[in-house]
Image: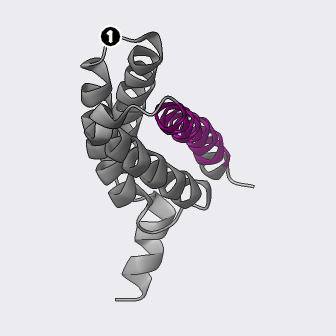
Amino acid sequence: MNHEMDNAHFMNEDFVLTVQDCEAVCEHMTHHLMRMQMGDRVAQAMLLRECADICGLTAKFAARDAIYARNTAALCADICQACGTECLSYPDEMSQHCAMVCLNCARHCRAFAAMGMPRRRRQREMEHE
């Protein structure tokens, strides 16, 4: 097996775990808001759901090194940033924790998206042109 492919696999594995953690934290926070019947936090709940959903998709795309994994990660970064910022506006400990997880995920997603298309995929696409 090629070392470049090995390194990419481990790098994607760490990234996938980070994004999956964000998905789980957002799902848990959504459940908490529903359980506590915090109807005044609709914007937060909506962003939490969107964040969890895009994180789930991003993790799947990154895990299989999908063609649009980096595009999805860029969108994930935007949504995680918005969700983290919204969660920061609430003083409770769970919201603050969720904010830190989301903002961390946004940073990782931006970095992953900025890496561009994997070299072997670029080569395959150039062969088909």
| SS under mark 1 | loop
Up/down of 18 relative to 75, above or below: above
Tell me which segment is drawn in magenta.
Answer: 6-35
Check disc 1 and report the residue beneath it: 91
Residue drawn at (41%, 78%), measured in percent from left and top?
Answer: 125
From the viewer's perspective, tell me whether residue 88 is left or right of residue 105: left
Up/down of 40 relative to 12, above or below: above
**Is 19 contained in the magenta span?**
yes
Q: Position of residue 103 (x, y in %)?
A: 35, 26
Residue drawn at (25%, 27%), measured in percent from left and top?
Answer: 85
Q: Residue 15 appears in which quarter of the rendering?
A: top right
Residue drawn at (45%, 34%), measured in percent from left and top?
Answer: 37
Secondary structure mostly seen in magenta is helix
Residue drawn at (37%, 41%), measured in percent from left and top?
Answer: 45
Q: Quadrant of the C terminus?
A: bottom left
Residue 110 seen in render:
no
- In the displayed orientation, state which residue is furthest to the bottom: 129
